[in-house]
Image: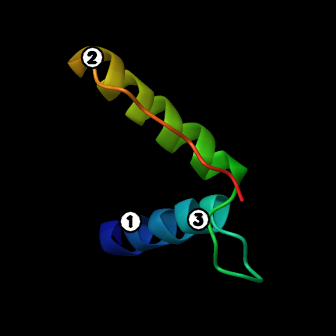
């Protein structure tokens, strides 16, 4: 039962972060990913850049 719940949780997480039509990551993913990467760059004092297409 725990395996089923874990599997469903992973599916929901992916559905929340990816566009179902294109399979590309969405803005919610960008918000989470960029926050983590910005924290790493600040901690390590390295530059970071972002390109949006």
Residue located farthest toward the bottom when viewing the structure as drawn: 21
Q: Which residue is drawn at 27% across and 16% down?
A: 45
Residue identifier under label 1? 6
Residue that extends furthest to the right in the rendered view of this protein: 21
Measure the alpha-carbon separation of dots 3 and 1.
10 Å
Mark 2 surroundings within 10 Å by alpha-carbon count, few (fewer than 14), some (14 through 19), many (20 or more) = few
Q: What element carries label 3?
A: helix
Q: Are marks 2 and 3 in contact (CB under 8 Å)?
A: no
Give the CA distance from mark 1 to mark 2: 36 Å
Q: Is the residue marked by circle 1 packed among few (<14), some (14-19), or many (20+) residues within 10 Å?
A: few
Question: Which residue is the site of mark 2?
Answer: 45
Q: Which of 28 and 34 is in front in this view?
A: 34
Foreground: disc 2 or disc 3: 2
Element at label 2: loop
- Find the residue positioned furthest to the left: 44
Q: Can you identify the residue that label 3 sits on?
A: 12
**Camera-nearest residue between 52 and 23:** 52
Residue closer to the observer: 4 or 22: 22
Query: Reading the chain from its start, which is encountered first: label 1 or label 2?
Result: 1
Upstream in sequence: badge 2 or badge 3? 3
């Amino acid at each position: 039962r725990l395996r089923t719940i874990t599997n469903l949780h992973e599916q929901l997480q992916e559905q929340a972060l990816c566009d179902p039509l294109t399979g590309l990551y969405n803005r919610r993913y960008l918000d989470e990913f960029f926050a983590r990467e910005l924290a790493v760059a600040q901690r390590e004092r390295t530059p970071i850049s972002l390109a949006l297409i």
